[in-house]
Image: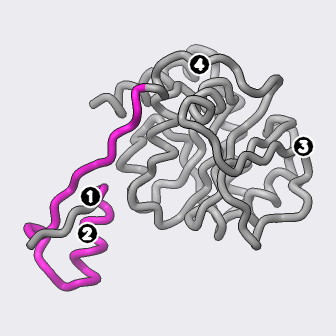
Amino acid sequence: QVILCPSNALQKQVAISLGIGMDKIVVAQPGVSPVFSTPQQRAVAGDYAVFPVNRHTLPCLGALRDAMEKRPEFFPPVLVVLGAPWSGEPANWGREVIRVERCPENIRASLMQHARMLLYTAVHDGAGVPVMEALCSGVPVLASKSCALGEIGGRALLHCDPQNSTSIIQTLRRFHDESAREQAERIAAGRSWISD
């Protein structure tokens, strides 16, 4: 018997947790639908960031909300929150929020492609599918290096400590200081990394 894992990082964690050899664990990274690299019509007007809410991002909500409160100028004025509502979500995000609980893949692709950035402040994500979708869409991604995210996004990601508002702010400051050329190179690197 073999265990199937979506990343090398998760393969190591499973091997340690179960006390078995890594040769019994096969890595098969998930794919991303071609719709994310196919141009989509804009679904939301204006300047916005996408934030997927899931069990990996919930532990980091406080730090992200704190960063938005301290330095609102580093964030777009609108936040598109993707995913089912969770009890731990803030009542006030400190900006306009568009809540999308469920949507077809092409709408999710549109939301990614036209966003200023994907805010994926997450911990313990062993697959990183939102990061892969965003990189295929050509959008900058703010994420941690934890678990599979560093492996999936490599140097194309804007790395931060997702549970530390100061780290989030410093990473966004570096992002805003990048030239248009540097940002274009980061996006191209992300697309290349994911296609590889």
Q: Which residue bears the numbered disc 2? A: 12
Q: Secondary structure at mark 2?
A: helix
- In which quadrant of the rendered view does residue 115 lie? top right
The amino acid beneath tag 1 is Asn
Task: From the viewer's side, name the closer residue of 175 and 98.
Answer: 98
Tell me the residue at 68%/59% (across/down).
Answer: 84
Cβ–Cβ below 8 Å for labels 1 and 2?
yes
User: What are the residue bounds of the magenta stretch?
Assistant: 6-34
Q: Nearer the viewer, mark 4 or mark 3?
A: 4
Q: Secondary structure at mark 4?
A: loop
The amino acid beneath tag 2 is Lys
Cβ–Cβ below 8 Å for labels 3 and 2?
no
Mark 2 and mark 4: Cα distance apart in space: 37 Å
Q: Which residue bears the numbered disc 4? A: 40
* Residue 39 percent location from the top left of the image: 54, 16
Q: Which residue bears the numbered disc 1? A: 8
* Residue 159 percent location from the top left of the image: 54, 47
Instruction: Check disc 1: other Cα within 10 Å, few if <14, some if 14-19, many if 20+.
Output: many
- In which quadrant of the rendered view does residue 132 lie? top left
Name the N-terminal-most of marks 3 and 2.
2
Q: Secondary structure at mark 3?
A: strand
* Residue 37 percent location from the top left of the image: 46, 23
Task: From the viewer's side, name the closer residue of 46 and 72.
Answer: 46
Instruction: Check disc 3: other Cα within 10 Å, few if <14, some if 14-19, many if 20+.
Output: few
